[in-house]
């Protein structure tokens, strides 16, 4: 078993099979107190000690099979945290199990947890807690073998104040009054399907739910719940389509939870309970492809998991491929091709941001001494998709290649895989086409930085109108601006409008006269679709439209989705005249941001970690 550069845990010596978790949520102190019992199987004879990952945890006591056990905390590492070394008072033979119980408390600065004050929620009355464990933050919430190579089932009980509701990435299993405290209620959860630690998730808040399908509910604060029920009403159709493509859905329930605006991602594929950003609530279901993406993770990522974060593309490349196959079924092949064109541009953006020679733009990067948060980008998603699409074209088209993807999922279900295992399976599945596979530039795709060695020729039918319109704007001289009319964009879908703005962001900045005319005829200021608004504001700031700086900073701070927040801050920071303003606004809002968003935005803006707002 290869080691995991992001974990201290000794999973070559032993492996956790199950967690039994009891947590008490303390909003006053912003900590979880509790205990976890890990069922650990020895993988070698004379097994006497194990290492768990922790980060900023206070360990109170450790027992093994009920007997007190010695434990020590190793030296603290900048992003891996602190190894917890436990010595058993007896030794085990290979195949034997031991129950290791750790009583502990999290820190108020646990990187997995964001504690929101009532003011930071939609309802403004109750506090809120949510977790985000991917990639390596679970260890700040639970002492565990925090590596995607280890898969566990779990049972949990969570004690919260009476007026709040808890949900987890598991099937709900009832509730009862807390026997220790009549003002609290204990919610119970079970997750019988083994999954990696990064998928353990918890949310506590003033939550309501609505049924949106036979196995789906949407959860959120009441301010968002009906809007979310409308936006995600096609969930069951997407689930059924995914099952037709990839095989049965094994997780039972598929719920969606819409989080407060500071959630740093578009979505997070926690089993039984996908997390979604409120920036998806466009009012016209046009951004629900993010849900198709998270649904697809139920197979690629959650069921078949990358063994370490270096193989992240196995999770994300396949999930984008499956998401676009769902789009193909529900919309058209041209729609899939159109989304692929947009993805290629996102990949180009990431490569430009990192630099074309940066090893983090490899499809399979080395993460030795690299914080996986710093490596996060659209590379594994879109370079991964481009490789799968390239293989699809070489091997006989979408139906043939989807047959391989489905077979790969069945072959490796419930386990974790490396790129080599994936490739070996690809060669054995297509054993009659090995000579074609041998012609693929594997080194160019897998271990060379920058853009892929092959650019697929996507069908541009849906993109042509966007390309033509963006060309008109980039070529237009000031005297030609009167030829632009509101009717230019009347026939474009919101997906096409996003593409049109993305194309303009790849060119030199437009003259200020042009973006002002664009506002006059298209009225993009009034557009509430977050993907359109985000690109429009970047375009305006880049063209030095000073009135739009405040709007850009407002969008960067009203929500905390990193895909929007980081580029908007960077855009204003690059406008010399407003650089100080970008820093001032960031420092003023930093405390409300998710820890990962705050940390990465600080790096973008070259802010020292101790810097405080100068008022």
Image (spheres, rainbow, N blue to C red):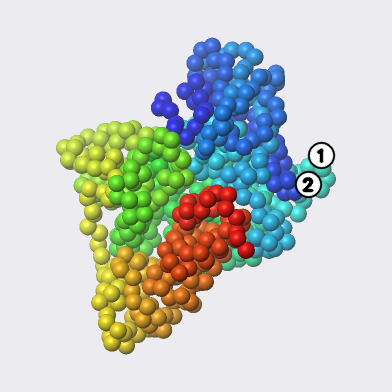
Q: Residue at x 60, y 60 (%)?
A: 614
Task: Kindly identify which numbered label has been placed on residue 180.
Answer: 1
Q: Secondary structure at mark 1?
A: loop
Q: Residue at x 43, y 39 (%)?
A: 370
Q: Examine the rendering and report whether any part of residue 490 can be seen.
A: no
| Quadrant position of residue 544 | bottom left
**Percent x, y of residue 459:** 25, 62
The C terminus lies in which quarter of the figure? Answer: bottom right
**Percent x, y of residue 426:** 28, 37
Q: Secondary structure at mark 2?
A: strand
- Residue placed most toward the observer, 204 or 330: 204
Q: Is residue 571 left or right of residue 37?
A: left
Q: Is residue 603 left or right of residue 517?
A: right
The N terminus lies in which quarter of the figure? Answer: top left
Q: Residue furthest right?
A: 182
Q: Is residue 464 left or right of residue 527?
A: left
Q: Is residue 228 above or below residue 91?
A: below
CA gap, disc 1 to disc 2?
8 Å
Q: Examine the rendering and report whether any part of residue 104 can be seen.
A: yes
Look at the numbered discs 1 and 2 and tell me whether their residues touch, using CB distance below 8 Å: yes
Which residue has dot 2 on it?
184
Task: Answer few, some or many: residues within 10 Å of disc 1's Cα (few below 14, many 20 plus, some between 14 and 19).
Answer: few
| Quadrant position of residue 118 | bottom right
Q: Is residue 591 above or below residue 34?
A: below
| Quadrant position of residue 535 | bottom left
């Amino acid at each position: 078993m290869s080691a995991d550069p992001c974990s201290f845990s000794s999973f070559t010596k032993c492996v956790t099979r199950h967690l039994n978790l009891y947590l008490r949520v303390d909003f006053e102190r912003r900590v979880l107190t509790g205990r976890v019992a890990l069922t650990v199987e020895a993988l070698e004879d004379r097994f006497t000690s194990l290492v768990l990952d922790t980060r900023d945890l206070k360990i109170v006591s450790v027992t093994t099979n009920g007997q007190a056990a010695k434990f020590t905390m190793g030296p603290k590492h900048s992003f891996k945290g602190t190894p917890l070394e436990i010595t058993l008072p007896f030794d085990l033979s290979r195949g034997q199990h031991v129950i290791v119980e750790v009583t502990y408390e999290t820190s108020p600065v646990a990187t997995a947890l964001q504690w929101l004050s009532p003011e930071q929620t939609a309802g403004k009355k109750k506090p809120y807690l949510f977790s985000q464990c991917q990639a390596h933050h679970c260890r700040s919430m639970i002492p565990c073998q925090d590596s995607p190579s280890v898969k566990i089932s779990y049972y949990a009980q969570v004690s919260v104040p009476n007026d709040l509701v808890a949900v987890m990435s598991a099937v709900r299993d009832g509730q009862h009054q807390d026997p220790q405290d009549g003002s609290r209620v204990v919610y119970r959860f079970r997750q019988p399907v083994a999954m990696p630690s990064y998928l353990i998730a918890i949310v506590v808040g003033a939550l309501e739910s609505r049924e949106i399908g036979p196995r789906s509910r949407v959860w959120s604060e009441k301010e968002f719940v009906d809007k979310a029920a409308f936006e995600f009403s096609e969930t069951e159709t997407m689930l059924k389509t995914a099952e037709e493509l990839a095989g049965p859905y094994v997780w039972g329930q598929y719920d969606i939870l819409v989080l407060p605006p500071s959630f740093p991602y578009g979505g997070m594929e926690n089993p039984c309970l996908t997390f979604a950003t409120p920036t998806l609530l466009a009012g016209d279901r046009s951004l629900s492809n993010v849900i198709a993406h998270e649904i697809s993770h139920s197979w690629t990522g959650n069921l078949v998991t990358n063994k370490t974060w270096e193989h992240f593309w196995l999770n994300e490349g396949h999930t984008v491929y499956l998401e676009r196959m769902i789009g193909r079924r529900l919309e058209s092949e041209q729609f899939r091709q159109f989304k692929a064109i947009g993805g290629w541009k996102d990949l180009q953006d990431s490569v430009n941001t990192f630099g074309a020679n940066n090893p983090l733009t490899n499809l399979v990067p080395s993460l030795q001494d690299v914080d996986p948060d710093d490596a996060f980008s659209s590379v594994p998603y879109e370079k991964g998709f481009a490789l799968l699409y390239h293989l699809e074209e070489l091997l006989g088209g979408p139906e043939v290649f989807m047959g391989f993807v489905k077979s790969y999922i069945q072959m490796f279900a419930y386990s974790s895989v490396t790129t080599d295992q994936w490739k070996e399976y690809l060669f054995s599945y297509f054993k009659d086409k090995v000579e074609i596979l041998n012609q693929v530039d594997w080194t160019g795709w897998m271990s060379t930085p920058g853009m892929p060695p092959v650019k697929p020729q996507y069908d541009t039918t849906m993109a042509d109108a966007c390309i033509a319109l963006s060309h008109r704007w980039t070529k237009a001289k000031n005297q030609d601006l009167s030829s632009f009319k509101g009717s230019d964009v009347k026939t474009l879908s919101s997906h096409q409008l996003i593409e049109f703005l993305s194309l303009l962001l790849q060119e030199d900045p437009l003259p200020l006269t042009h973006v002002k005319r664009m506002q006059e005829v298209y009225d993009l200021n009034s557009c509430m679709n977050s993907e359109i608004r985000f690109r429009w504001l970047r375009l305006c700031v880049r063209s030095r439209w000073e009135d739009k700086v405040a709007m850009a900073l407002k969008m960067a701070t009203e929500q905390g989705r990193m895909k929007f927040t980081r580029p908007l801050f960077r855009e204003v920071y690059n406008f010399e005249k407003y650089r100080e303003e970008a820093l001032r606004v960031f420092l003023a809002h930093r405390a409300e941001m998710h820890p990962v968003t705050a940390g990465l935005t600080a790096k973008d803006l070259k802010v020292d970690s101790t810097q405080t707002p100068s008022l």
